[in-house]
Structures are given as C-alpha cells and as structure tokens.
Image (tube, helix red, strand yellow):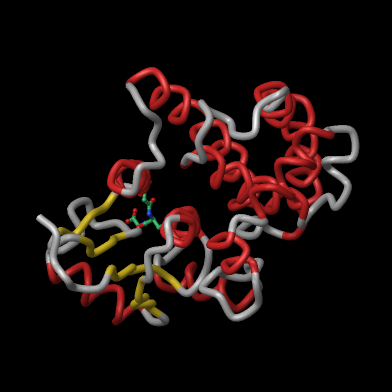
Amino acid sequence: MSDNKPVVLHYFNGRGKMESIRWALAAVGVEFEEKVFETRENYEKLLKSGDLLFQQVPMVEIDGMKLVQTKAILSYIAGKYNIYGKDLKERLYIDMYVEGTTDLMQLTMSLYFMPEAEQKKQRDLIKQRALNRYLPVYEKALENQEYLVGKKFSLADVHLLEAILSVEELNADILKNLPNLQAFKARISSIPTIKKFLEPGSKRKPIPDATYVNTVKKILHM
Ligand SMILES: N[C@@H](CCC(=O)N[C@@H](CS)C(=O)NCC(=O)O)C(=O)O
C-alpha cells in the first residue's frame, strides 16, 4: 500500500490535536508537508471534498489513504515505524500511557481557548493533575527503565516528552521532585530525530497565541 507521495498533514497552523502526530512523524524521521487553513473558505473546501470521514481534522494523507481520528493515525504511524511494542501486551501499555498523556495534554490544549477569567483555575488544575495524577505514574514506570515500555523507544515515550514540555511551559519547575522524569526528558530529547525537532526552525508549532486561537474559533464558528 506504500507509495512515494509525500505525507501531507491538513490542519490549522498550530498545535491542537495534530501536534502529537507531528511529534510522532518527527521521532521516526518521516518528512511531511502541511496544508494549513487560515480561513473558513480553505476549511470548507476540504469539507466539501468529502475527504474528511467525520467532517473533522486532523487529516493525514499517507500511503494513498486519507486518515482521520488522531488515535488511529498515531497507531498507524507507530505500527508502521516499529514504535508500537513487540507484542499485544506491550502495545496495551503503550496505549494506556498515551491515553494518560493525552488526557493531561487535553487540559493544556483547552487552556488557551478559555476566557481569560477562567484560565487561572485551569492552570491550577493542570498543575494539580500533573503532580497528583499523571506524572507520578510515569516517574514510577521509569524506575530502573530507560523507556516506558520494554527496552525500546515507543510512541509512549515521544508522547510523554511532548506532555512534559507542554506542562513545563506553564510550570517551569514541575519536574523538581521527579528525578526519573528529569533524566528521561534529557535522554529522549537527545535522540537525534527528536533533538532536531526541538531546534528552532523545525515543524514544531509554538505555544498558541491570540492570533491562532482567534483563527481557529473563526474557522470552526466557535
Ligand atoms: N476524535 C477526533 C476529534 C477531532 C476534532 O474534534 N477535530 C476538531 C478540530 S481539532 C474539528 O474538526 N472540529 C470540527 C467539528 O467537529 O465539526 C480526533 O481525535 O481526531
């Protein structure tokens, strides 16, 4: 089913649900192009094309297919590029860890779309959930382990690094009392493909600003 066409991502010009897909592709060293929509017209054109199975983005053109649903897209990339465990049990753990980091990142993702007055409460919630629910799980899992699952880098690792960075943007010292996660962050950030993605000029998207938030709201009639 493979072809030589480039991988093309269809999304807004910002992080959102697509950012984890950018991270995964970057981690496995796959180049991609982006078709970003800046206006409602761009978005409607894609809607009318019938290429969005559920009339939603992210959409990714890969191997002659037009994939939607973030989880499914991540699983496909992880399976295809061998970062999805060695057996069903490892895959299950990768899925569970990825769902955990997805839930945590959902909190940071929605923060930027909230009215100013509600943001303080959300920031407190993010910190509390990170420290009391999510990060301790990963800290424990990394006790005497280089990677979250098995002895090999997986989708769970790249997803966790993305989540750590998104929480650190709001709380710089969030890893203060989490030594395994500090070491993990340094280790995963130094993997050459990931190191490159972390450098300026990569396709990693910046922290959402007002322009991005307003563009998305306008396009989606939010
Ligand atoms: N379950 C889907 C949800 C996708 C989703 O909610 N996409 C938003 C943009 S981030 C969208 O297209 N919203 C327009 C709509 O739902 O009509 C996924 O994880 O990919």
Residue 187: image x %, image y %? 69, 47
Q: Is residue 158 left or right of residue 21?
A: right
Judging depth in this view, the residue of 93 and 149 nearest the camera is 149
The x, y position of residue 206, in whole percent, is 63, 70
Q: Residue at x 40, y 65 (%)?
A: 220
Q: Is residue 173 left or right of residue 213?
A: right
Q: Quadrant of the N terminus?
A: bottom left
Residue 20: x and y in percent read: 48, 53
Q: Quadrant of residue 78?
A: top left
The extreme top residue here reads 89
Relative side of 7 to 4, left or right: right
Count of picture labels: 0
Position of residue 173 relative to residue 146, above or below, is below
Question: Left or right of 108: which side holds 87?
Answer: left
Q: Quadrant of residue 7?
A: bottom left
Out of 169 and 31, give the one closest to the viewer. Answer: 31
Q: Which residue is at 57% across, 60% downward?
A: 194
Q: Nearer the viewer, residue 127 or 201?
A: 201
Which of the 4 quarters of the picture holds residue 18?
bottom left
Q: Give x and y (percent) for residue 157.
A: 56, 41
The answer to whether residue 40 is above or below residue 92 is: below
Residue visible at 58% across and 30% down in the picture: 148
**Which residue does the image show at 38% across and 36% down from the upper left?**
84
